[in-house]
Amino acid sequence: MLKTTVPRPSRWPDPLPQLLFLLRWLLLCTLVSVLAGTASAVFLVSLDWVTRYREAHPWLVLLLPVGGLLVGLMYQYFGQSVAKGNNQLLEEIHQPRDVIPLRMAPLVLLGTLLTHLVGGSAGREGTAVQMGGALADQLTKWLPRALRLRPRDRRLLLVAGISAGFASVFGTPLAGAVFGLEVFLMGRLRYDALLPSFLAAFGADWVTQAWGVGHTHYAIPVVPSFSPSTLAVTLAAGVLFSITARGFVACAHILVNAFKRFIAWPPLRPAVGGALLLAAAWLLSISAVPDITRYLGLGVPTIVAAFEAPLPWYAFGLKLLITSLTLGSGFKGGEVTPLFFIGAALGSALAWVLPLPVALLAGMGFVAVFAGAANTPLACILMGMELFGTGSVGYIALACVVAYLFSGHRGIYGAQVIGEAKH
Amino acid sequence: MLKTTVPRPSRWPDPLPQLLFLLRWLLLCTLVSVLAGTASAVFLVSLDWVTRYREAHPWLVLLLPVGGLLVGLMYQYFGQSVAKGNNQLLEEIHQPRDVIPLRMAPLVLLGTLLTHLVGGSAGREGTAVQMGGALADQLTKWLPRALRLRPRDRRLLLVAGISAGFASVFGTPLAGAVFGLEVFLMGRLRYDALLPSFLAAFGADWVTQAWGVGHTHYAIPVVPSFSPSTLAVTLAAGVLFSITARGFVACAHILVNAFKRFIAWPPLRPAVGGALLLAAAWLLSISAVPDITRYLGLGVPTIVAAFEAPLPWYAFGLKLLITSLTLGSGFKGGEVTPLFFIGAALGSALAWVLPLPVALLAGMGFVAVFAGAANTPLACILMGMELFGTGSVGYIALACVVAYLFSGHRGIYGAQVIGEAKH
């Protein structure tokens, strides 16, 4: 059951190969950190600008179909080789074929900014991870002989790039390091990329901060002490978070397939998706739903609000549908910030019925829905510690573990390989 | 390279089996938590009493040979079936044969208390982990039909017991949960025991606290911001920590073999070990070394002192030799608290030469030497966060990763299987 095909290394190897390994990866990860950290800084600053511009000019949502068409055309004529995005990185980790084209980085940056400019509901981690991974992978081409990159090194380099992108875009280096190790294999974690992922994650986060870019802070001020009843509530909430994660994965999957089936010409898909988003926003705004714009874009102000007072019960569902439509139709951006929104909104709404503080429930949902959808429980627990401190870690950890356990063997990353069944 | 033999589970399984899995493990882990948490509480309280009694009656160290003989006789006549200790638990996880005899728990408890009563240098985690593992494994016998324990469940139960013991004895539930998942396989982490290990770790920690038992606190008040020079210092310190971890593993290994080779009758080994310890203490006390008793027993006051001002450079080496002699000759107890001492003392002494605050270096050594010796880097990083807060996590994490990377493919647990080469 536990047999492995790994050759048993010599028991007392020289320290020299380890020292060379350390120095090689110190150099490589410094380059990855500068590239990915700078890319994340540029992205975060421009995303902030785009978001504020859109909020100041609400009519821009009328351009949703046009923005979708532009994103679609861009990928149709320049981006076919990089259209698979995050999954392309994971596939290369599993079965290395070709170096990721450099154009993945600018295309996903432009595509995401365009998506946010017209009010599409998307996130950041996909963009940062693709920029980090694509930039890191260029080192395979740029530095082939000087540093003697073995084929195996390329896998570690991709993991380092993913870790660097994730760490720097959210300001959570520990979560970023473990995310890179955890994301490509469900149910197992391999340690061979431990040093590259940690060096790149902490380095890239440092570079982004050195550019003067900060991150949003969340607080869980009140944490009740553990008791059998709070444990039961936490496990129940974890199950609800996992059902929501499953719902998101299924919804996005169904929409992707529907768009592919009914619209043959790819650039038309996000254009139609944009039109549907616009129609949905209009329908919702003439119905009873107040302030529909909070569900567009990143939605960080609403995530912050979820920690302060219970949100309405339908908020998480609306965001789930709008995000699935945005990403399923072919707009660009990540899934993770919308998943934070969905989870925090659901947790926040659960404070109406569950006897735990609203900020704690929002924080649990914030990371647990993501843990269930991405199948990365350890990264999500670490993220909870980095964002909310260590006081709430028991609740956060159990919610993430249950959300992971119940979310099924499918996730937002189709190229994730099942290494171990969940139960 | 990444092929696995795990059958691909159905993509959308019913939630029913997961719910049953959750409820079954909630019940099992409640039992494990109560058993292991209570055992840890009894152990910590009695250990505290024994330590204070020994400190009040320094002549007790004269009984080191007698104490050794008693421990040896106890295991010779009652404990041959449980003499392999921690490694026995790991072997059962890898190749399940028989239920761990219940006597492992009282024997290791008595053996450890006796070791500490006469001033042997040993730790706590081995004792807590063996009590937790042995007690948890009894559920295999006690509840065979009612809960339908499958053979695979026993493996998860042992992991839960290990996690519960570790979590409750150190008051670090997150580190305990990950330690149980991480310890039996070097270079890989499997997630199938995720829920049991987390439930048991948090539950047992809660039970121990509910018994009114507290844990020592450590503080790292000043943490400089990252820079290329602090990074370089951190990596260099990590290499030194790993060399120390290697030294400990090698020293313990050599001594175990030497005692086995030169002393045929097992009970005589700890008796001779005790006599050698006594001789060493006498030799050191007539030489220039002040306050030799600080190297006996757990040494928690010295660990606390290491955070406050730099310790002398030889402190870590003395503790390393005295602990190797104690455990290598057959006294009982864990390796981990001495490893905390060795690491914190080395880190503290490095403050004489390295430009980082003494508390930070002590904290880095505290967890990093253990990370290198036990090959459990993630558990050690989490322990650092739980003990010292999130402010120092970058330094702690990189020191642990480097210490793990450089410590070779051998560790304090001989039954640990290599799942993946380190580099």
Image (tube, coloured by chain):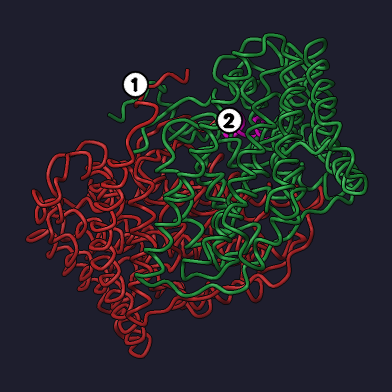
Chain colours: A red, B green
Q: Name the dominant secondary structure of the magenta segment.
A: helix
Q: Quadrant of the N terminus of chain B?
A: top left
In the rendered image, residue B19 lying in the magenta stretch gets the answer yes
Looking at this view, is B125 or A105 the one in front?
A: B125
**Residue B130: x %, y % from top left:** 72, 28
Q: Residue furthest front?
A: B286
Q: Chain of mark 2?
A: B
Vertical arrangement, residue B104 with respect to residue B207, above or below:
above
The residue that disc 2 covers is: B252
Q: Quadrant of the C terminus of chain B?
A: top left
Residue in view at x 50 percent, y 80 percent = A291
Vertical arrangement, residue B253 with respect to residue A97, above or below:
above
Asked which secondary structure carries label 2, the reply is: helix
Magenta residues, start to end: B15-23
Query: Mark 1 belongs to which amino acid?
Result: Thr
Vertical arrangement, residue A218 with respect to residue B149, above or below:
below
Asked which secondary structure carries label 1, the reply is: loop
**In the drawing, does residue A176 fall left or right of residue B36?**
left
Asked if the residues shown at circle 2 and circle 1 are in contact, with their CB atoms under 8 angstroms apart, the answer is: no
Query: Mark 2 belongs to which amino acid?
Result: Ala
The residue that disc 1 covers is: A5
Looking at this view, is B261 or A254 the one in front?
A: B261
Residue in view at x 8 percent, y 48 percent = A145
Quarter of image, res B157: top right
Residue in view at x 40 percent, y 40 percent = A191
In the rendered image, residue B234 lying in the magenta stretch gets the answer no
Residue B229 visible in image: yes
Residue B145 visible in image: no
Looking at this view, is B277 or A59 the one in front?
A: B277
Q: CA distance from mark 2 to mark 1?
A: 29 Å
